[in-house]
Amino acid sequence: MTDPETQKAPDAGAAVAKAPAPPQKKAKAATAAKADPNDPAVRAIRLRRRFIWTAVWSFVTVHLLMFMRFFFPRALFEPKTVFSVGGLQYLGLGVDTRFQQAYRIWVVRKPDRVFVIYARCTHLGCTPDWKESEHKFKCPCHGSGYDTDGVNFEGPAPRPMDRAEVEVDATGQIVVNTGKLYKCERGGRCEFDDPGSFIVT
C-alpha cells in the first residue's frame, strides 16, 4: 500500500509551466502595432487597402448617380420662340446684332421697313457672322455670303436666309416669332413681302 503521507501534492510550478500560451492573434496584433510605417511591405498593404476602398466607393457613387438620373426629365431647354426686341425708336438704320447670341436673329432696319433675319445659313445650317467692314453676312463654314437683306450672292448657299415673323404689339414693342419663318425659294415663290414678314416704318 502506498503511504498517504508519502503522496506528494501536485507541483504548483509544473502547473504554471503547462499553462496555455497566449493566442497568436494577440501576438500578431502586437506585432502589427509595432510595424514600421516606412516598411515597404506595410506600405504595400496600406496602398492595396486604399485602392480597394477607392474602387468600392467609386462603384457606389456611379450607381447612385445613375439611380438619381431617373428623377430628372430629359428635357432640352431651348430659347423662347416669341420675344420682344424693344421699341422701334431704339433701332437705328442697318443691322442690329444685339440679339444674335440669345435668339439667333438680326434685326434689320431699312428706310421703309423693319424685318428680322433668322441667322441660319441655308447651305448646311451654320450661323453666319455680320461683317460690318464688308457690309455683308459671311458663313464661316463654307464661305456663303449674303447682303444686308439676307439674300445670297456668293458661295454654295442655295437661297436667301429665312425671315422671322415680326409685329408691333399694343404697347409699341416689336415682337418676333422665330417659330414662324418666311422663305424665298429659288425659282419659286418668295414670301418676303407677305404680311407678318416685315413692319412698315
Image (cartoon, rainbow, N blue to C red):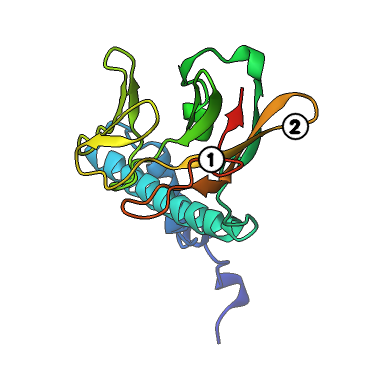
Left or right, 185 with reference to 97: left
Point 80% across, 30% down: residue: 170
The reply to whether the C-beta atoms of the residues labelled 1 and 2 are less than 8 Å apart is no
Point 38% across, 49% down: residue: 49
Say which of 106 and 22 sits in front. Answer: 106
Left or right, 149 with reference to 116: left
**Residue 38 appears in which quarter of the rendering?**
top left
In the rendered image, residue 7, in percent from the top left (x then y), is placed at 56, 72
In the rendered image, residue 33, in percent from the top left (x then y), is placed at 42, 39
Viewer can see residue 27: no
Say which of 48 and 105 sits in front. Answer: 105
Residue holding disc 2: 169
Point 30% across, 41% down: residue: 42
Pick out the residue farthest to the bottom.
1
In the rendered view, tell whether residue 69 sits above or below residue 141: below
Q: How dense is the environment of label 1, judged by Cα within 10 Å: few (below 14), some, or many (20 and up)?
A: many
Q: Quadrant of the N terminus?
A: bottom right
Q: Secondary structure at mark 2?
A: loop
The residue under label 2 is which amino acid type? Asp
Q: How dense is the environment of label 2, judged by Cα within 10 Å: few (below 14), some, or many (20 and up)?
A: few
In the rendered view, tell whether residue 105 sits above or below residue 77: above
In the rendered image, residue 173, in percent from the top left (x then y), is placed at 71, 25
Viewer can see residue 61: yes
Tell me the distance, in whole angstroms, between the alpha carbons under discs 1 and 2. 16 Å
Residue holding disc 1: 164
Left or right, 128 with reference to 85: left
**Residue 114 appears in which quarter of the rendering?**
top right
Q: Secondary structure at mark 1?
A: strand
Q: Which mark is residue 174?
A: none
Say which of 125 and 113 sits in front. Answer: 113
Total marks shown come to: 2
